[in-house]
Image (cartoon, coloured by chain):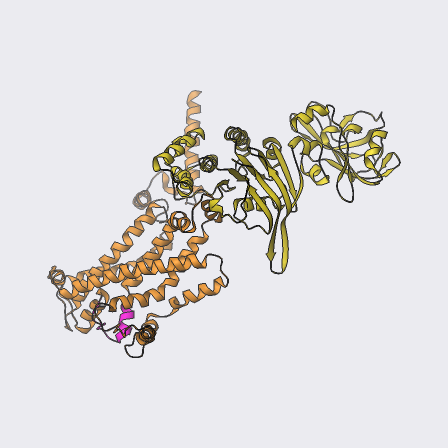
Chain colours: A orange, B yellow
């Protein structure tokens, strides 16, 4: 009697289990008693990569294949080229038989590369920080329930919709030494004229200023969304708790914008790394104003002007690693918060 | 600790060209250490009143005094009040410890050690001593509630303001916190203004309750007085669950006549009514008793429609015999056996009826209490 009960129980359990997989949306496994090679492999894959790995493949595999080939494959190929000595327009193409790190040694000893790396670093950090600060201040002001709030938001966001080429062209005019509007305005209060684009020590900051003008609207919108998510009673509780307006923002509101800050800064940093278009359009050529040469411009110049393909690839890999260093912590942060 | 006085407080909101009077000429005084509950239906202006006291809402006219000082123009930061919000409004990026010390850091010049000691002491009286390192999103609703309370208690303010602090808790926890809040307030002896729409909270917690409707103060008195001696029909209707039964009646000599019944009055009642003849007749469900047959002059034949057994009592919905559209609710003992469709008689005792002026809603006659002294003592 007891045996019968025990068997009934185990039967029930196994039925339960198979019901469970079906309820999950999975396909009930027909070949459960005698799994063949295909069945075994599939079950092994499912165990390793999660339920329905094989069954769901038609949905994600084509896109995965395209991405793998044209994005990650290209990066990998670029890495391989950077290990060759390929240059000039040889018909033979790169020689893959002799791979070494010669180009990397050359890059680390090249003052141009070091200089461009420093400029890239200053541009990324300087641009991101100023844009975040300006964007935050704009967001805090716009969020105070002002009149024409939507109009202001649109006005501040509009520069973002312009292409880098347009921005570069009219900042070129504005920074003009003789009749640019910047020098004219400064002239009325007795300053300047200043050679914004010709002076090596300030040209990078002039570029950062122009880029900040273009992107602080974006930072503002991200921060506004963050501010909207903070309930009003948080402000009120801080006020009743005796905090002054400045303290209220500093201790209660701004710390809650951490998420907005992180996502905005990742986007801004990536934009800063891509500032190539802006610098290219500024001079309509591969040679940006002295003092603004960044890795992106150097890379393109080496590759397409000097046809140093391998060397250009090496610089590209250095740039890629820098981008990875920025993105990596963000991905880890998102992963920890279960957003990936 | 101080007395809080609201003197003809009015708040007008502007919506385009429209003026919306949210609070209309409310005057009340909360004694030093008193627990005043402000209660009313939603949209009655109770929260706006509280927010004006907190300094979160400007005052259109009137004055708020704390102690002897008018605080109309004192900024919220400088008012020395603490507020508990309905949503708790804990700072999500701070630990419980930081949440509780924030107010002390911002509003007092206490040293870090003193603040730490005070926070710990308050936390342990609130039973949240072991949660100090946690963040609000790691706490249950009840724990967050305690932190929000602790955050205001630790400040030791002149006045506590509470804006429906229990409404986000489940029923069991709410009952428990209700008792605990009362005990705390008694211990701390801080002037407290407590806003709620829940009449159970109003009845059980307050020293006095203030009932608001459409921005106007309807009555301010002890809970029992509001219940047994309402100032007008609104108060009579709002306080009590299930609510008071109302019938429009006309007075003809010493009888109250409606299409449902004719109710003979004794001489001692007629005096209260003066020469008003359009009246509203009110009787609380628990004062209606159900008897088998109509044998006295205040018994009326009725038919049972629905019985809602609550265990300790039955709520019985009836209609008057011959008037299926009419309705009267009676609360009878849980053991009295009443079944649907049963024909019996509702006894409406004369001592328990309330009469209101149908035009103004004002009360003309309140129920007689058996021992006036006993109730007076509790008022």
Left or right: B366 in relation to B96 = right
Total label count?
0
Picture quarter containing residue B118?
A: top left
Q: Name, please, the residue furthest toward the front.
A: B68
Residue B370 located within the stretch drawn in magenta: no
Classify residue B26 as left or right of residue B149.
right
Please identify the quadrant where the C terminus of chain B is shown. Answer: top right
- Residue furthest toward the top? A1
Picture quadrant where residue B65 is located: top right
Residue B55 lies, in percent from the top left, at 52, 47
The answer to whether one can see residue B48 in this image is: yes
For residue B100, above or below residue A136: above
Judge whether B19 appears above or below B359 on screen: below
Task: Report whether A89 appears left or right of A176.
Answer: left
State the image quarter where residue B236 is shown: top right
The spot of residue B36 in percent (x, y) is 59, 36
The percent coordinates of residue B369 (x first, y second) are 74, 26
A78, A10: nearer the viewer: A78
Which residue: 64% across, 51% down? Answer: B21
Residue A174 in the figure: left or right of residue B371: left
Give yes or no for residue A290 being in the magenta stretch. yes
Q: Relative to B238, say whether A88 is above or below.
A: below
Residue A204 at x, y percent in the picture = 25, 67
Instruction: Point out the stretch of residues depicted in magenta.
Output: A275-293
Residue B266 is at least partly visible in this image: no
Judged from this view, the residue extending furthest toward the bottom is: A178
């Amino acid at each position: 009697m007891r045996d019968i009960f025990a068997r009934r129980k185990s039967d029930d359990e196994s039925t339960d289990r198979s019901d469970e997989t079906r309820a999950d949306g999975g396909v009930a496994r027909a070949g459960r008693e005698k799994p063949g090679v295909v069945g075994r492999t599939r079950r092994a894959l499912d165990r390793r990569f999660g339920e329905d790995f094989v069954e769901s493949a038609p949905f994600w595999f084509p896109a995965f294949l395209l991405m793998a080939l044209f994005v990650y494959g290209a990066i990998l190929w670029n890495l391989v080229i950077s290990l060759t000595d390929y240059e000039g327009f040889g018909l033979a193409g790169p020689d893959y038989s002799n791979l070494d790190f010669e180009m990397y040694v050359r890059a680390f000893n090249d003052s141009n590369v070091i200089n461009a790396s420093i400029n890239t670093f200053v541009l990324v950090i300087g641009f991101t920080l100023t844009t975040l600060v300006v964007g935050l201040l704009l967001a805090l002001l716009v969020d105070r329930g002002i009149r024409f709030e939507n109009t202001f938001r649109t006005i501040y966001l509009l520069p973002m919709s312009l292409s880098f080429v347009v921005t570069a062209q009219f900042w070129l005019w504005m920074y003009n030494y003789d009749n640019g509007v910047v020098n004219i305005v400064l002239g009325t209060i007795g300053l300047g004229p200043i050679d914004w684009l010709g002076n090596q020590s300030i040209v990078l900051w002039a570029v950062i200023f122009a880029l900040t003008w273009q992107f602080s609207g974006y930072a503002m919108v991200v921060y506004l969304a963050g501010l909207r998510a903070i309930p009003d009673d948080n402000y009120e509780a801080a006020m009743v708790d005796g905090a002054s307006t400045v303290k209220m923002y500093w201790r209660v509101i701004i710390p809650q914008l951490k998420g907005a800050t992180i996502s905005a800064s990742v986007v801004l940093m990536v934009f800063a790394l891509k500032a190539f278009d802006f610098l290219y359009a500024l001079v309509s050529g591969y040679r940006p104003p002295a003092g603004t040469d960044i890795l992106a411009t150097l890379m393109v110049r080496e590759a397409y002007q000097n046809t140093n393909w391998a060397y250009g690839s090496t610089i590209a890999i250095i740039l890629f690693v820098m981008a990875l260093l920025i993105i990596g912590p963000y991905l880890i942060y998102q992963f920890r918060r279960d957003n990936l | 600790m101080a007395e809080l006085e609201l003197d003809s407080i009015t708040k007008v909101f502007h919506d385009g060209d429209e003026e919306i009077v949210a609070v209309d000429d409310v005057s009340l005084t909360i004694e030093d250490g008193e627990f005043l509950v402000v209660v009313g239906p939603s949209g009655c202006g109770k929260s706006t009143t509280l927010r004006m006291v907190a300094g979160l809402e400007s005052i259109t006219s009137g004055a708020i005094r704390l102690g002897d000082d008018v605080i109309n123009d004192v900024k919220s930061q400088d008012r020395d009040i603490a507020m508990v919000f309905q949503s708790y409004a804990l700072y999500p990026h701070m630990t419980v410890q930081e949440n509780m010390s924030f107010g002390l850091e911002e509003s007092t010049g206490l040293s870090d050690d003193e603040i730490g000691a005070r926070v710990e002491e308050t936390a342990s009286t609130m039973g949240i001593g072991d949660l100090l390192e946690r963040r609000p999103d790691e706490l249950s609703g009840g724990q967050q509630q305690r932190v929000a309370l602790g955050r205001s208690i630790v400040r030791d303010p002149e006045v506590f303001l509470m804006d429906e602090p229990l409404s986000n808790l489940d029923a069991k926890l709410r009952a428990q916190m209700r008792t605990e809040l009362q005990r705390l307030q008694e211990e701390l002896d801080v002037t407290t203004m407590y806003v709620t729409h829940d009449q159970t909270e109003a009845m059980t917690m307050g020293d006095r309750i203030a009932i608001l409707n459409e921005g106007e103060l309807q009555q301010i008195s002890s809970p029992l007085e509001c219940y047994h001696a309402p100032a007008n029909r609104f108060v009579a209707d709002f306080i009590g669950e299930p609510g008071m039964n109302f019938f429009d009646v006309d007075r003809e000599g010493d009888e109250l006549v409606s299409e449902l019944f004719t109710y003979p009055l004794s001489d001692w009642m007629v005096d209260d009514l003066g020469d008003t003849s359009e009246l509203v007749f009110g009787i609380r469900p628990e004062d209606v008793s159900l008897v088998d047959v109509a044998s006295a002059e205040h018994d009326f034949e009725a038919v049972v429609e629905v019985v809602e057994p609550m265990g300790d009592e039955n709520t019985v919905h009836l209609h008057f015999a011959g008037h299926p559209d009419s309705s009267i609710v009676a609360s009878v003992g849980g053991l009295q056996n009443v079944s649907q469709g049963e024909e019996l008689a509702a006894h409406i005792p004369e001592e328990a009826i309330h009469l209101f002026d149908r035009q103004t809603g004002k009360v003309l006659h309140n129920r007689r209490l058996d021992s006036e002294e006993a109730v007076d003592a509790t008022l």
